[in-house]
């Protein structure tokens, strides 16, 4: 059932989960400004949530913090839930109607949507895609899991403004069966085990949520999938949209899509069409895994009708995304990279591969989410030094390193201690990379807090520091 603007004035709205990353704030702001009676409820207290509460200062909002009350759900006309809240919550069982900021946005969005999901690479792909679109459509916007609620820009959208949405499996699961999502272009970057604590170690359940990205498509739409990947093959066969591949290597004749060849990217939109150059060899970002994300963005831009030369120009100057192998400073010839968004072992592996031949000091470790570090075994000997942060996942990582006789330092009880060791022992011409490979909870509020704290440590010692 679609949401209607005319229903809002006087509506009783409960926002479940104010959070710190924008979704709860923008939901509360959106409804309060439009005349709804808004209650915000969160299990955390005002001290933790202060940055979000400050952003809503002056709005007529009632706060219920450090607890939930059943009456706030029973009496609400609509409950806006945070994606992190499970649908089997006993409080949500009392709600008459459950929505999210994403479902409200999709009900009201006037223009075309391009959507991106996957286990990793979503934010880089979304940001590169958005950058390319802005060259032709100045009103183009991006939002979603990238910590920008689309409700924050909904009122300023025109019918011709394309919107790029980063969608997590949780966000997709929340809109299942609502008939709201029909992206002109859908991209699935890759699939790795993730959030297995949420999905009870069931990869099929995790992937089922990812598939929702294309379920509303038809043959006027395009679905972009990773060629050669077993999940990608399934997506290509199932999607009701037109499948297009993106590949690490040249595609076979007759396969439509994009590929990397000699460090550059090419696109073929028709089976017999000549290849078109869309991705230059020299880029501002590091890591082959980031190049494949830009290739997917280049393919999506081509399908959306953007000129190839313009695509090359925009992708060549794309600076990357905060917390994704972000160069954030330099000291005595040592470069420091913030890769705090690396929350799974595969992302850690990609970071280690990104600096061939360079002395690498790695800071890793954190909280477990039922993932396994076996994929890191072949790369564990590459870093010159490994510094581990305490955490439940770190115990698994320690076990792997011990079995391989790979030395490490720590576990440290604070990022400051690990950073002091890594920065003090790194040699000129080398890199210090903070790529945890685990989730952040316990020592940090989230991966963004984790990354910002690393960058602050770099800033304090750097000859030169930078931030996106």
Image (cartoon, rainbow, N blue to C red):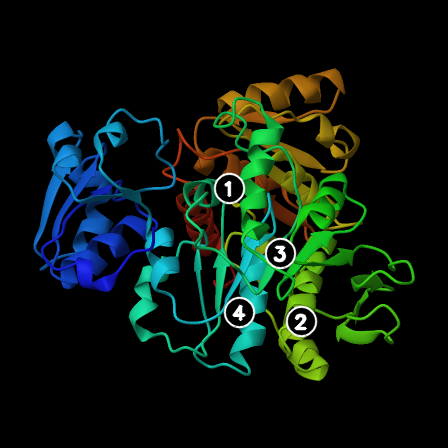
> Which element is circle 3 on?
strand
Q: Residues within 10 Å of mark 2 (few under 14, many from 20)?
A: some
Left or right, 325 with respect to 104, comes to right
> Which element is circle 1 on?
helix
Above or below residue 301? Residue 40 is above
Residue denoted by label 3: 187
How many numbered discs?
4
Give the camera-side residue of 329 and 269.
269
Q: Earlier in the sequence, mark 4 or mark 1?
A: 4
Residue denoted by label 1: 169
Residue denoted by label 4: 130
Residue denoted by label 2: 303
> Which element is circle 2 on?
helix
Query: Looking at the image, which residue is at 15% across and 57% down?
Result: 32
Q: Residues within 10 Å of mark 4 (few under 14, many from 20)?
A: many
The answer to which image quadrant residue 274 occupies is bottom right
Q: Are marks 1 and 2 in contact (CB under 8 Å)?
A: no
């Amino acid at each position: 059932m679609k949401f209607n603007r005319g229903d809002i004035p006087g509506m009783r709205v409960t926002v479940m989960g104010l959070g710190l990353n924008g979704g709860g704030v923008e939901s509360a702001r959106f409804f309060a400004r439009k005349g709804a009676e808004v209650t915000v409820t969160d299990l955390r207290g005002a001290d933790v949530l202060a940055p979000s509460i400050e952003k809503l200062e002056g709005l007529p909002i009632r706060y219920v913090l450090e607890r939930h009350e059943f009456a706030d759900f029973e009496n609400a006309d609509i409950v806006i839930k945070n994606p992190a809240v499970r649908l089997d919550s006993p409080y949500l069982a009392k709600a008459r109607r459950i929505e999210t900021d994403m479902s409200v946005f999709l009900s009201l969005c006037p223009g075309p949507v391009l959507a991106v999901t996957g286990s990793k690479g979503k934010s880089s792909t979304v940001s590169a895609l958005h950058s390319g679109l802005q060259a032709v459509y100045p009103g183009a916007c991006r939002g979603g899991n990238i910590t920008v609620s689309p409700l924050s820009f909904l009122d300023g959208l025109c019918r011709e403004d394309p919107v790029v949405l980063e969608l997590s499996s949780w966000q997709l699961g929340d809109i299942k069966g609502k008939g709201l999502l029909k992206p002109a272009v859908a991209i699935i970057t890759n699939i790795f085990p993730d959030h297995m604590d949420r999905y009870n170690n069931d990869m099929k359940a995790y992937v089922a949520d990812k598939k929702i990205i294309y379920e509303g498509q038809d043959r006027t739409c395009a679905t972009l999938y990773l060629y050669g990947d077993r999940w990608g093959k399934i997506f290509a066969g199932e999607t009701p949209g037109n499948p297009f591949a993106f590949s690490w290597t040249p595609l076979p004749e007759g396969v439509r899509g994009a590929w990397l060849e000699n460090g550059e990217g090419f696109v073929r939109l028709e089976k017999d069409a000549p290849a078109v150059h869309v991705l230059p060899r020299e880029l501002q970002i590091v890591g082959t895994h980031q190049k494949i994300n830009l290739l997917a963005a280049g393919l999506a831009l081509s399908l959306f009708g953007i000129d190839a030369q313009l695509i090359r120009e925009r992708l060549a100057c794309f600076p990357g995304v905060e917390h994704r192998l972000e160069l954030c400073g330099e000291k005595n010839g040592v470069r420091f990279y913030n890769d705090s968004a690396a929350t799974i072992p595969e992302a850690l592996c990609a970071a280690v591969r990104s600096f061939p031949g360079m002395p690498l000091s790695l800071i890793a470790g954190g909280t477990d989410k039922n993932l396994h570090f076996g994929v890191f075994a072949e790369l564990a000997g590459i870093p010159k030094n490994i510094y581990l942060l305490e955490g439940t996942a770190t115990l698994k990582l320690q076990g792997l390193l011990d079995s391989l006789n790979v030395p490490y330092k720590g576990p440290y009880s604070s990022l400051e201690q690990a950073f002091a060791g890594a920065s003090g022992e790194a040699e000129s011409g080398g890199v210090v990379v903070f790529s945890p490979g685990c989730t952040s909870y316990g020592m940090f509020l989230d991966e963004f807090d984790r990354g910002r704290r690393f960058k602050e440590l770099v800033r304090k010692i750097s000859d030169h520091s930078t931030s996106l």
